[in-house]
Amino acid sequence: MLPHPPGQNGAERPAGAGEKAASFRGSREFAAGTVFSWLSTNEAAAGFSNNIFLCLQEKVERGEKGYCYCALMAQDMSLQKQREWDLQTQCLTGFVDLGAGILDADEAPLASEAIILMAVGISSPWAAPLGYFFVNSTTGYLLAQLLRQAINKLNNIGIRVLAVTSGTTARGAETARALGIRMDSERIQCTFQHPPGSAQSIMYLFDVCHALQLIRNALQCFQKIEWPGDTVRWQHVVELAALQEQRVLEPCSPKSGIPGSKGSYYLKVNLATQLFSEGVADALEHLQNLGLASFQNCSGTVKFVRLMSHLCDVFHGRGPYRMGLKGPLLAGNYTKITHLFNEAKSFFVTLTDSMGRYIIKSKRKLGFLSLLLNAESLKWLYTNYVCPEGSPSHHFLTYAFSLDPLELFLRTLQQACGNGSPTCTVFQAAYHKLLAGCNLAPGSPYSSGSGSMSSWDTAQSCRRDLTLGSICAQYNPAHGRTLATECPYCAGLLLHGSVLSNALIDLSLHVKSVTCTAGFIAEQLASDLQCEACVASLFESDESRLRCRSVLYIKKLGGVSLPSASVYHITSISEQVLNRYGKVGDSNENTKLWHLSLEQKIFQELLGGSPLFPTLTNHLFDGEVNLQQAPN
């Protein structure tokens, strides 16, 4: 567990916390104890959910240390302003509701937004939606008041809030100021006191993915950013994303696991690569070394991208067993991370536009300031909770401070509500259904309607518009989607009696057919995947030229990229199963049961074979924070 900060009494949780939480009647910090009661509810109505707080209290009282500390976050969801008649309650609905019930008056405003609050574990992967509120206008001041109420309620059941996370938006900045956060490059105040004037501090962070989007926007708008001695150019990134496949000389003796793999190598940019990543920095350097004119004098861009990549490694730490900047926060890496933060600050404060005006004081400053604030917050966390002498051995992941778990919840909620902005009635019904499906199963935090979506899927989705592919789509929408809508070889995998199945009588034709089919499948998957490592694993690539997954040297045969040995093997096994079991009546071929049966047989054939996708072993074991919802 995390140690208590200096000046605390050292108790595992506040004395008498269980007794104070039993009735949820309020807090001694507030003069009026009725505030808590009318902001709380036992049903899935607007307000704080008493049932969730009771479940969390039970966890704390059972001595589960992972529930002693958490991060708190809030986000809004748009609603359709509509007055409706509730047949059950015989009341009009759709109005503003802060947990005290709907305002019963002619002048009551209709609700246009729902504010959702969530607590997320820091030293243990759990997430709990604390409640929601119907409002007609969300302001930073209102959010600050709701956050303080949530902090009080969590403190009363023995859960200490160490951090508050918000979106990197104007409203998020307004909320930060309302709490007492100071965002100034010359003087940053990263914590606020709660209760006001007390010795208890809580750090404030902005969502890093949102901050990166703002920095991307700033670079795109300014086109070039300068600092003493060098220049960052947006055009270098555009040229990289738009780089067409280029044929290169045949290597001496490539090793391939695919039969009949004679062909030519082509240089191909991996469009799934994140903009602010080591892969983009390596790719720019590699293309500069090749002598391509568009990438000359790109050292400034490389330096900027590499610095941003290192910051992302720290702020997106999600692998408990990873080392260095990508690993958890430990006392042993404090010096290295602090040096990186100091380097970033000295870098950001000197950046200027082409007119010599400082970026940190411009209209595009929020992304840079938010990263500086986050850096100060993590340094504060190190000083007070990670590095003090005598503190127990522990570690935690910075990913817990992102908005991903709340965005996963909201995405699942939106799916349950249907298309468009829901009405208050639809929102309440979906929220109630979602809470009813809460469970503790790792990796499935919201069992009602979440499908196969995980926190990793959410993180990838949030970062989708930070890939080279998103930049390519902006400047050249037609690039990257030149595949035919239907491949004859691929059709052979799905239909009995087709070219591929008949090719079994000619072994050379069969090998070529399977190879081309597998290559087509690899290209289709590559156009949809958003993971750089996974895309690279789909193709046969010459790693002797460049061990970098952002630039691939892919072999082609007949215009189709040759697949990796694993993709080829899976395709070959699939073809064999289809040829063996696919001879059924046409009326049954499209049934769900038939497809499931074929999938099961394919998996049975693959079990016990050689390991698939060996290049992904380390990638798959990087780790993920499996967020589980609070118990019900």
Image (cartoon, helix red, strand yellow):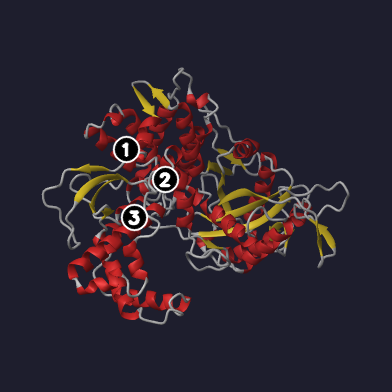
Q: Give, as a three-letter code, the residue at label 1.
A: Ala
Mark-to-mark CA distance, 2 and 3? 48 Å
Secondary element type, mark 3: helix
Tally of marks: 3
Tag 2 residue: 387
Secondary element type, mark 1: helix
Pick out the residue farthest to the left: 252
Percent coordinates x, y for residue 461 in the rendering: 48, 51
Mark-to-mark CA distance, 2 and 1? 33 Å
Tag 3 residue: 523
Residue nearest the viewer, comparing 84 with 406: 84
Tag 1 residue: 281
| Quadrant (top left, top right, bottom left, bottom right) of the C terminus | bottom right
495 above or below 133? below
Residue at 55% across / 59% down in the picture? 127
Residue at 33% across / 28% down in the picture? 300
Residue nearest the viewer, comparing 500 with 155: 500
Q: Give, as a three-letter code, the residue at label 2.
A: Cys
> Would you say 201 lies left or right of 358 here?
right
